Amino acid sequence: MSSGSLPSQGLQRGVKICGLTEEAGFDACMEYGADWVGFVFFERSPRNITPQQANRLSARHAGGAQRVGLFVHPEDDTLARVLDVVSLDVLQIYASDDRAASIRHRFGLPVWLSKPVASADELPTVCAVDRLLIEPKPPTTATRPGGNAQKLDWSVLHGWKPTFPWMLAGGLSPDNVEQAVKETGAPAVDVSSGVEIQPGIKNPDAIKRFIHNARAPLFHIN
Ligand SMILES: O=C(O)c1ccccc1NCC(=O)[C@H](O)[C@H](O)COP(=O)(O)O
């Protein structure tokens, strides 16, 4: 697969809205055409959702955006328990490359791996799974590895030419996403805090604007 330039639908830039917990936010993702919706299975997160709640939300719409389950260093048992209750299309994982590849093999689902970076020399050159999420390192005081509304220094990505699918995450919002894709050439973008009224509660209008603005720039590769 080349250059990470293949979002889920043709040449349209891929958009993932993460951390859905309630109906209005979930329905907005479906109405405004998000490519992926994320459910956070991490107890310390304000966006944590139970498998049963995720299943109920997911059942509100047949089809539409792919359902992504987000896990932090999960055991196989945890993944199996969630997948018993809610059907997921993608597993988004915080783990090592080897562990992520092993989860992919064990569960037979596409796996996306989060790659926190702080400088250009930390940018990955290979991808052991299906997609990498490039995001900033969390603040030292953070209680979770992502979803902290922290923006990556986009200049870190200048000149980076990955040969695998990737997605930009961290501190994006309806107001900065257009500039973010222009500066980085990101083929896909991921947001949580930037489209929220409060942690875990999404703003439908912000979701609409985020999706529109993310797709506004012509598709190009950096
Ligand atoms: O959202 C959380 O609470 C969370 C908890 C544990 C690991 C990851 C988490 N979120 C990751 C994300 O939602 C995405 O990477 C997101 O695009 C970045 O978050 P934000 O800066 O809030 O947009």
Image: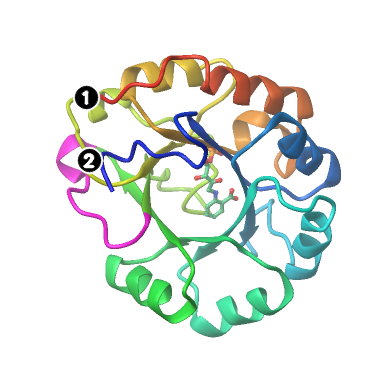
Residue holding disc 2 = 162
Q: Residue at x 56, y 15 (%)?
A: 175
> Residues in magenta?
119-130
| Nearer to us: label 1 or label 2 | 2
SS class, disc 1: loop
Q: Residue at x 28, y 48 (%)?
A: 1
Q: Can you give x and y, in whole percent of width and height, for residue 66 in the image?
A: 62, 51
Q: Residues within 10 Å of mark 2 (few under 14, many from 20)?
A: some
Q: Can you give x and y, in whole percent of width and height, for residue 192 in the image?
A: 60, 39
User: Mark 2 near ligand 1 (CB under 8 Å)?
Assistant: no
The relative height of residue 217 versus residue 120 in the rendered view (above or below) is above
Q: Residue at x 48, y 16 (%)?
A: 178
Quadrant, the C terminus:
top left
Residue type pointed to by label 2: Pro
Q: Can you give x and y, in whole percent of width and height, for residue 132 in the image?
A: 36, 50
Q: In the image, 53: left or right of 2? A: right
Q: In the image, 32: left or right of 106? A: right
Q: Quadrant of residue 187?
A: top left
Residue holding disc 1 = 158
Q: In the image, 183: left or right of 174? A: left
Q: CA distance from mark 1 to mark 2?
A: 11 Å
Image color mode? rainbow
* Residue toward you, 12 or 122: 12
Residue type pointed to by label 1: His
SS class, disc 2: loop
**Is residue 129 shown in magenta?**
yes
Q: Can you give x and y, in whole percent of width and height, for residue 94 in the image?
A: 43, 61
